[in-house]
């Protein structure tokens, strides 16, 4: 006998995750609808395997901090940008779906101004995604399927940069979006400082650090 339950009946505590296998595309779409948009959980889907995870407060603080520092970096370089946060990016053709912790359009920002619905058959993927790997590891296969150019991953207290090249991700010491800035050094430094300082102070100090680089 097969027992079916509604996805809304699955309750996850902070830091927990659940993996569902043999989920076809229509079931994936139905699950997204069942979960709704007003939720704290994040999903990743690739070729029949769906993971649902519930972030920890530590996860959320790191995400907000890195996103804040990235915005300051964009401002100091006088670059235009758009962010779609943890929007669901999905492609039936590639059998993949992801909800990044945060994401930014920099090169393709104009395409996202005022955007209310997303269709990856015509719309670009983000130029840069942020992932916080605390309770789970980023599902790289889904990102490879969607070909997001750059991923910033926070792991083991440090920032790692992965660039999409020739169908796969490679670790890089420099950012594709900010090649002239020592991003890993700077972000990792201020993530370490975040253990003792509030975000407001970190934002101010990071801006001063960036301005000193151009002196």
Image: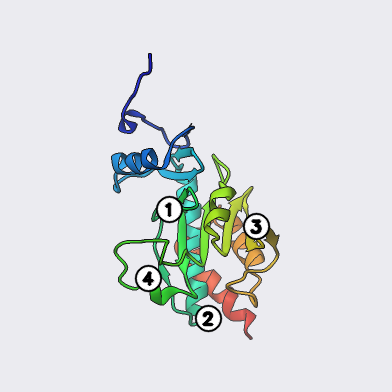
Cα distance between the residues tagged 4 and 1: 16 Å
Going by the picture, which residue comes out furthest to the bottom? 215
Q: Which residue is mark 4?
A: 112
The one nearer the camera, 174 or 57, is: 174
Q: How many marks?
A: 4
Mark 2 vs mark 4: give the one in front. 4
Q: Are marks 2 and 1 in contact (CB under 8 Å)?
A: no
- As displayed, is residue 37 above or below residue 76? above
**Residue drawn where x is 40% and y is 59% of the image:** 85
Badge 3 local density, few (<14 within 10 Å), some, or many (20+)? many
Task: Assign the C terminus to one quadrant of the image.
Answer: bottom right
Q: Which residue is mark 1?
A: 90
Badge 4 local density, few (<14 within 10 Å), some, or many (20+)? many
Cα distance between the residues tagged 2 and 3: 26 Å
Q: Earlier in the sequence, mark 1 or mark 3?
A: 1
User: Residue 120, position in %: x, y?
Assistant: 42, 61
The one nearer the camera, 16 or 169, is: 169
Q: Is residue 51 left or right of residue 137?
A: left
Q: Which residue is mark 2?
A: 77
């Amino acid at each position: 006998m097969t027992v079916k339950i509604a996805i809304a009946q699955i309750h996850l505590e902070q830091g927990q995750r659940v993996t569902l296998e043999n989920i076809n595309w229509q079931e994936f779409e139905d699950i997204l609808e069942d979960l709704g948009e007003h939720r704290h959980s994040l999903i990743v889907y690739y070729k029949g395997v769906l993971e649902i995870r519930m972030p920890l407060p530590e996860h959320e603080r790191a995400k907000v901090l890195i996103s804040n520092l990235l915005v300051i970096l964009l401002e100091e370089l006088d670059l235009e940008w758009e962010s779609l946060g943890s929007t669901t990016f999905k492609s039936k053709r590639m059998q993949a779906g992801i909800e990044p912790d945060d994401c930014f359009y920099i090169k393709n920002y104009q395409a996202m101004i005022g955007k209310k619905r997303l269709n990856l058959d015509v719309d670009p993927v983000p130029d840069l995604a942020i992932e916080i790997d605390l309770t789970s590891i980023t599902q790289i296969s889904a990102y490879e399927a969607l070909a997001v150019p750059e991923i910033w991953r926070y792991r083991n207290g440090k920032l790692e940069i992965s660039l999409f090249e020739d169908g796969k991700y490679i670790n890089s010491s420099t950012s594709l979006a900010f090649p002239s800035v020592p991003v890993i050094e700077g972000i990792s430094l201020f993530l370490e400082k975040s253990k003792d300082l509030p975000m407001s102070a970190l934002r101010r100090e990071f801006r001063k650090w960036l301005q000193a680089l151009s002196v």
